Image (cartoon, rainbow, N blue to C red):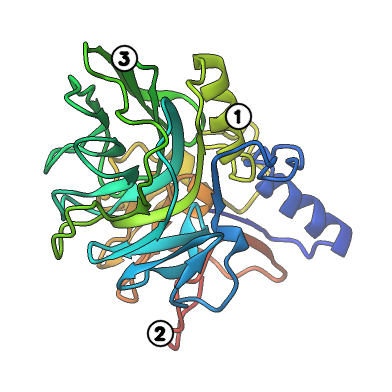
Amino acid sequence: RSIVVHKTAFSDADVATLAKRMLGLITAPPAPPPFCSGQEWVCLNADDVQGPDGTAVSSWKGFTSLYDPPVLVKAGIAYLPAIQFNANSGLKRDDTTPSVVSVCALAQYTDSTGFWNQIIGQGHDQFWVIRRYGDQNKMTMHTQNSNEPLAAFDYGKPYVFCGVNRGSSNTVWVFNLDGSIASTLTSSCSQCTIPSAGTSKEISIGWSNLKKPGEGFKGLIRSIIAYKLALTDVEVNNVVRRLLANIAVVGVQPSASFCTGNEWICLVADDLTNDDGTAVTSWGQFSSLYDPPIFRRTGVNSLPAVQFSTNSALKRDDTVPAQMTVCAYAMYSDSTGYWNQI
């Protein structure tokens, strides 16, 4: 994400100050209260799932696996734990249907796989569900015979998806990780009501009651909160803040003084204007060597970063210093590469 090098040997205290300045690009929110207050109908957080990376999730706070169990991914959404679904995996619990419902989920769709690809719901057409609309990259809050609201989103990016059924209307929101609204829509309808409140009907996550192989949710879910209430817009925003409470603020820009001019090398990915996924042929005074690295708009801690493969590099000609201090805000993906210098 960033590199600072000085042609001097820093003291331990100066190194600590430099590291804090580099990490100051992220504004950490205050410590959040307990995630689940006990007032929710459904409250799930991937932090509660124990086990090493790749562990099969056969149960998640009252939900049990349906077909293939999903798996725990330790560095899932914003490098925090999440549960990964593969379009054939799901979770369920027995419950009764509400008369109105509000639900928010911090989740990410991998791609357009799966037609009946709900995040969470009871039934499919005749009760309630929040899901992607068919094969389109649009979220919907669906209840029986409803005129479905559609809110657009991008594959491969995490969002907070929210839906509220108020009896006479359904509203769906797509929130970015900084809490801003990416898209939203409300649809009024004469038959938006959830039928037969109190009917016994399993709640399923990642899978619809149609049970068609390969048609379930494919992606990551970090957390879900649902209420048997029709939340107001303000209350929905409060739930969104809870879901995002321990995620680094996205899009926080460094101050203009990140590079003071006293450094030998000073690079920060925020200075790059590339589109997401494009080649970085130059960065500061460095140019590409072999394969160029790739710019990622949401990289380290959901902030801009430059992604290197084991065949990509950047270089510049210079002279060797007598002393040196270097700090880099970076992340190793895995153990690939023996001569793997930053």
CA–CA distance in space, label 3 to label 1: 46 Å
Q: Earlier in the sequence, mark 1 or mark 2?
A: 1
At numbered mark 1, what does the secondary structure look like: helix, strand or loop? Answer: loop
Residue 202, disc: none
Q: Is residue 17 left or right of residue 181?
A: right
CA–CA distance in space, label 3 to label 2 = 55 Å
From what the image shows, is residue 269 above or below residue 89?
Answer: above
The quarter of the picture where residue 307 lies is: bottom left
Query: Which residue does the image show at 60% across and 25% down from the upper left?
Result: 238
- The mark found on residue 256 in the picture is 1
From the top left corner, tell me how far across and down residue 198 is, in percent.
42, 36
Tell me where residue 276 appears, x and y as whole percent: 30, 44
- Nearer the observer, disc 3 or disc 1? 3
Residue at the spot 45% in from the left edge and 73% down from the top edge: 58
**Kind of residue sitting beneath label 2:** Gly
- Give the amino acid type for the residue marked by disc 1 in the picture: Ala
Please tell me whether mark 2 sits on a helix, a strand or a loop: loop
- Contact check, label 3 and label 1, Cβ < 8 Å: no
Inspect this view and state whether residue 178 appears. Answer: yes
Which residue corresponds to mark 3?
A: 169
Other-residue count near label 1 (Cα within 10 Å), few / some / many at <14 / 14–19 / ≥20: few
Q: Which residue is mark 2?
A: 337
**3D distance between C-alphas at marks 1 and 2:** 35 Å
Check disc 3 and give the amino acid type: Ser
Where residue 45 appears, as percent x and y from the top left, is 56, 53
* N-terminal-most mark, 3 or 2: 3
For the residues carrying marks 1 and 2, which lies nearer the camera in this image?
2
Query: In the visual, does 307 lie left or right of 43?
Result: left
Kind of element beneath mark 3 = strand
